[in-house]
Image (tube, coloured by chain):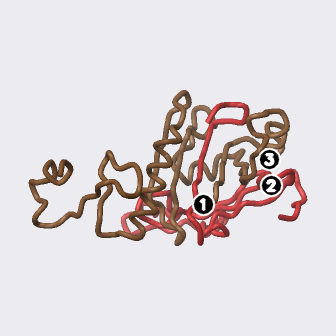
Amino acid sequence: MGATLVTVSTDTQFVHLAWKDHEKELADVKYLMGADPTGEVSWLFGVYDENSGLALRGTFIISPDGTLFNSEVNFYNMGRNIDELMRKFKANLYLSRKANEGCPSKWKDEGDATLKPGPEMVGKVHEALNK
Amino acid sequence: MADTPQGCARVTGAVLGAPSPEEPVAQSADGTIKEEIMTARVGQKAPDFNAPAYYKGSFANVQLSDHFGKWLLLCFYPGDFTFV
């Protein structure tokens, strides 16, 4: 989809290298792995945990003009769901072209029903979703 | 991307556009310290930063604003050798 992936943890770049070299799951990794050992960058995005000195599992979707559109933060022991992430990503791409529409919770991909908020929809969201 | 020399003096990234610690902190009339550093909020510009990075076998630097122009996914995680 032509998006750039940047990851950040409070490890140093040297540990990133060691991890990349030892973990077969990462054999195809070609994204930037940022090092934030003092937690400054993590703090900036509200995911720094002072108690542990670690970054929580934060995921941020940023538009081409630098606007933050989505923010999701999971606790340490809760993994991210790639399907939900892709859903959000696709919804953002779609809405960047169709700013006057809304993607409801069940929206998964282009072609799925969207909402067009307006006077005629007030009190009729149920009907609009179940057309 | 060219390999960046890795020093030991400054091992971490920096917040871009933030006042340096030596500068006097701006105070408003009632004495409360103004928050100069903007933290991330949905619907607003993502705060910029610069940090050392690892990229395709080399050490590099990552500056968030260098990647504006395309959609960008920024993921934080507690540590290498953990799951996603």
Q: Are marks 1 and 2 on the same chain?
A: no
- Image depth: mark 1 or mark 3 in front: 1
In the rendered structure, which amino acid carries the disc numbered 2? Arg
Task: Answer with left or right where residue A129 lies relative to residue A124.
Answer: right
Q: Measured along the vertical axis of the image, is residue B15 above or below residue B84?
A: below
Judging by colour alone, the chain drawn in red in this rendered image is: B
Q: Name the residue carrying label 1.
A: A3
- Image depth: mark 1 or mark 2 in front: 1
In the rendered structure, which amino acid carries the disc numbered 1? Ala
In the rendered structure, which amino acid carries the disc numbered 3? Gln
Judging by colour alone, the chain drawn in brown in this rendered image is: A
Q: What is the C-alpha distance between the residues marked 1 and 2?
A: 30 Å
**Chain at numbered mark 1:** A
Dot 1 falls on a residue whose secondary structure is loop
Residue B50 x %, y %: 69, 61
Rendered image: mark on residue B10: 2
Looking at the image, is mark 1 or mark 3 earlier in the sequence?
1
Q: Quadrant of the N terminus of chain A?
A: bottom right
Rendered image: mark on residue A13: 3
